[in-house]
Amino acid sequence: MKLSPITYYIIESDDNTIRLIQREIKNFGDDFKNLGVYRCHKEGHKRVLREQPDMVFLNMEFPFFTGAEVFGKTPGKKSDYIFLANVNNFIYQNIKASKYDCLLKPISEIELKRLLKRKVEARKLGRQLNYGHYTPASTDYKFKKLQFPTSNGYIFLSPDEIMYCKADVEYTLIVTQKGKHLISKNLKYFESILNSRRFLRAHKSYLINIDHISLYAKSEGGHLIMSDETMVPIGRSKRPVFTQLFGV
């Protein structure tokens, strides 16, 4: 008996990623059926809830969106989510410990082919795809604090204490309400370990805790005043993110 194709949606804003996925899936002939492509996660999510496809390729880079919001809301059969994320995206740390698949950008053609082949083989063997509830790994920090190396040893800080991180060549200056600490890690490292729903890259040199923003000013290209009265510039490419955050 001929098996029905694996139906799927792509919820992704990057055209290159969309083209790559569609090109590789095309090589599998009638094993897959494309139900649609959405560049807005809200519209795509609504369609997924309504249609309940077998698979969903879901971009994790939409502003203020972790992907966890889509689970627990679909009645009946659950879709098999394939997350598309950068290695420094916070949700990636959770997905690695879950049963869902995650492809890192830029997507490797080899990894994508392996994943698609695995899905087809599972269907032919009568196995379920990764349907079920999403159970993220714990996002609690050990001892509720993070450990950072300094020239004098180690400091332990709660993410709540951190107002912002400022790049200093290959070092990072962590600023808290109680003091400053120069850490021998670059800013990208902190972007990868701090919760991306709370800490945002405002500028190439600043990673800020949105809970410590005191003022948002549109003048001079846009800048933030933090709770210690430090002015943080907003990079041109980051302005749409903050415009959406503040609803202005």
Image (cartoon, rainbow, N blue to C red):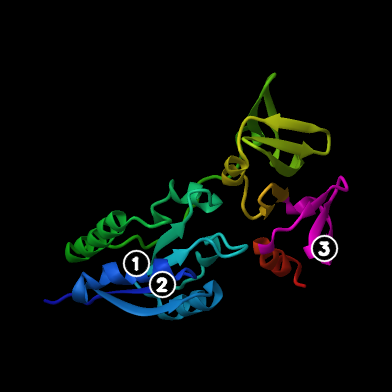
Q: From the viewer's perspective, tell me whether residue 46 is left or right of residue 154.
A: left
Disc 3 marks a residue whose amino acid type is Glu
Residue density around tag 2, few if under 14, some if 14–19, many if 20 or more, within 10 Å: many
How far apart marks 3 and 2 lie (CA) works out to: 39 Å
How far apart marks 2 and 1 lie (CA) works out to: 11 Å
| Residue bearing the label numbered 2 | 10
Q: Which range is magenta?
A: 209-236
Pick the front one: 230 or 80: 230
The numbered mark, 3 or 1, whose residue comes first in the sequence reads: 1
How far apart marks 3 and 1 lie (CA) works out to: 40 Å
Does the magenta segment cover residue 223?
A: yes
Disc 2 marks a residue whose amino acid type is Ile
Residue density around tag 3, few if under 14, some if 14–19, many if 20 or more, within 10 Å: few
> Which mark is on residue 55?
none
Disc 1 marks a residue whose amino acid type is Leu
Q: Which residue corresponds to the image point at 58% horizontal and 63% vertical from the top-left?
A: 65
- Secondary structure state at the residue bearing disc 3: helix
Quadrant of image for the C terminus? bottom right
The picture quadrant where one finds residue 240 is: bottom right
Q: Nearer the viewer, mark 3 or mark 1?
A: 3
The total of numbered circles placed on residues is: 3
Cβ atoms at labels 3 and 2 below 8 Å apart: no
Q: From the viewer's perspective, tell me whether residue 161 is left or right of residue 193.
A: right
| Residue bearing the label numbered 3 | 220
Q: Nearer the viewer, mark 3 or mark 2?
A: 3
Q: Which residue corresponds to the image point at 65% horizontal and 37% vertical from the top-left?
A: 169
The numbered mark, 3 or 2, whose residue comes first in the sequence reads: 2
Spot occupied by residue 226 in the image (x, y as percentages of width and height): 83, 50
| Residue bearing the label numbered 1 | 20
Q: Is residue 104 above or below residue 49?
A: above
Q: Is residue 129 visible?
A: yes
Spot occupied by residue 117 in the image (x, y as percentages of width and height): 22, 60
